[in-house]
Image (tube, helix red, strand yellow):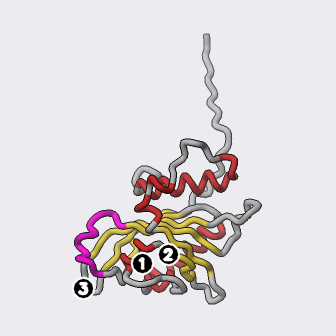
Amino acid sequence: MQDRSIHPNTRILIDAWRRMSRGPDSNAVDDPRVAEHPDLITQLFVVQHSNDNGWQFRTAGQGLSDLLGRDLTNHDFLELWSGPDRFMMTHFMEAIRYDGAPGIVRGRGETLAGQRVEVEITLMPLVRPGGQTDTPRLLGLYQTLGGEPMLKGRPIWRHRISMLVPPDTRIEGPQLRLVATNA
């Protein structure tokens, strides 16, 4: 995953996810703290895979609920998308689930009155105790990329996908460099 163009909150969350995935002993004293990122916490949510292939919201931060104009608990995350975007999102979330790595969605949210705002949604598998990643729950971060005042307080109802950044499943091994000199 190319980290250059992602939102700073996304970078913080992915870094924290990577540290937690390695184990609790990998956390350092200078790691970011929750109190340092209050805008990030209110935009977090958890979705759970259901038997009918939906992804039900289990929890959603108040900032996200306010932005979407409703309590999201027990609503299907996939209902935020329509047509081909829903199919793409369904398969994208399955890729995240099975690959066990974060993915990012760039798109736009639109109010019923037609105001639009760019959004970035980060999804990552929640790791069960023991390090197993085949879990039916994903942690998500939903954030606007500026332009929120253009919504004029109206809730976002429709979403469209602009770009999907799939999970990066490359295995990072030792980095060796061979240097030869002909002296």
Three-letter code, disc 2: Ala
Q: Say whether residue 164 is visible.
A: no
The answer to which of marks 3 and 2 sits earlier in the sequence is: 2
Which residue lies at the image location 31% right of the left edge and 79% below the top edge? 110
**Residue denoted by label 2:** 60
- Mark 2 is surrounded, within 10 Å at the Cα level, by few (under 14), some (14 to 19) or many (20 or more) other residues, namely many
**Residue denoted by label 1:** 65
Residue in front for this viewpoint, 90 or 153: 153
Which residue lies at the image location 23% right of the left edge and 72% below the top edge? 150
The residue lying furthest to the bottom in this view is: 52
Q: Reply yes or no: does residue 43 show up in magenta.
A: no
Q: Are marks 1 and 2 in contact (CB under 8 Å)?
A: yes
**Residue denoted by label 3:** 113
User: Where, quadrant-wise, is the C terminus in this rendering?
Assistant: top right
Residue 18 percent coordinates (x, y):
60, 53
Q: Which residues are magenta?
A: 144-154
Which residue lies at the image location 48% right of the left edge and 82% below the top edge? 72
Q: Can you tell which of label 3 and label 2 is closer to the viewer? A: 2
Hey, which quadrant is residue 114 in on the image?
A: bottom left
Which residue lies at the image location 63% right of the left edge and 66% below the top edge? 126
Q: Can you tell which of label 3 and label 1 is closer to the viewer? A: 1
Residue 26 percent coordinates (x, y):
66, 46
